[in-house]
Image (tube, rainbow, N blue to C red):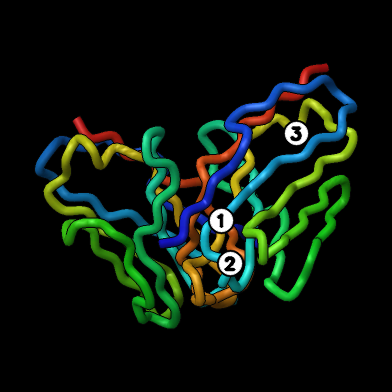
Amino acid sequence: KAGVTQTPRYLIKTRGQQVTLSCSPISGHRSVSWYQQTPGQGLQFLFEYFSETQRNKGNFPGRFSGRQFSNSRSEMNVSTLELGDSALYLCASSFGPGETQYFGPGTRLLVL
Amino acid sequence: KQEVTQIPAALSVPEGENLVLNCSFTDSAIYNLQWFRQDPGKGLTSLLLIQSSQREQTSGRLNASLDKSSGRSTLYIAASQPGDSATYLCAVPPANQAGTALIFGKGTTLSVSS
């Protein structure tokens, strides 16, 4: 069974640009969550989607947005990039709330 | 607000030692607790999930325990190997929520020398 896949794996952007990251969950999983990981703040929750509905949102500015499609694939978008958005963005999928989460390899974003 | 703390932040042991990693959380009203491992620059690998009704879970050389009333979990690694070197993270959902919005500790970075 294929694991969680994330594309692209690496991105370099400049301040003010926008970026879209993609996550394909494990087949059969309907729940997708996104996290930001930085050396200073550690892992912080961004969004949680289940069956195309956003169930929960972390404490991030409105520049961070996401969505989930009918096939459970998910995208997150960051507009007006700032230097502090440089991070590893991780996606996780599970069958549903309360189930084991499986993480993808992440997308490493560098904002210059 | 739920907070997760992991002690120690770093640990170095010789191969073959048994070791314990600690995780504490401030609000005991959790549905479950999950332990992960992260290798440098990589994603997270799920190790064990303990539901709130369980006291412990075992997988191979790993054993995780959960004491909700005291807000603590431990991850026991038996007969450590160099391949166990990684950062170990524990995570819980927000109190009284069964969702996937996990709150993570900062992790314990383990180094096992041969």
Q: Which mark is residue B84?
A: 3
* Residue at 19 percent of width and 35 percent of height: A83
Regarding mark 1 in the picture, which secondary structure is present there? strand
Q: Are marks 1 and 2 in contact (CB under 8 Å)?
A: yes
* Residue at 73 percent of width and 49 percent of height: B74
Q: Residues within 10 Å of mark 2 (few under 14, many from 20)?
A: some
Q: Exactly how many numbered labels are in the figure?
A: 3
Q: Residue A13, located in which quarter of the rendered image?
A: top left
On the image, the x and y values in percent for residue B44 come to 58, 47
On the image, the x and y values in percent for residue B29 come to 56, 72
Q: Nearer the viewer, mark 3 or mark 2?
A: 2
On the image, the x and y values in percent for residue B69 come to 67, 66
Instruction: Give whichever of B84, A42 is nearer the camera.
Output: A42
Q: Is residue A74 above or below residue B11?
A: below
Label 3 amino acid? Asp
* Residue at 66 percent of width and 53 percent of height: B35
| Residue identifier under label 1 | B25
Q: CA distance from mark 1 to mark 3?
A: 24 Å
Q: Is residue A18 above or below residue B71?
A: above
Q: Residues within 10 Å of mark 1 (few under 14, many from 20)?
A: many
Q: Which mark is residue B28?
A: 2
Instruction: Give whichever of B47, B98 is nearer the camera.
Output: B98
Q: CA distance from mark 3 to mark 2?
A: 29 Å
Task: Look at the image and tell me in which quarter the C terminus of chain B lies.
Answer: top right
Q: CA distance from mark 1 to mark 2?
A: 7 Å
Q: Residues within 10 Å of mark 3 (few under 14, many from 20)?
A: some
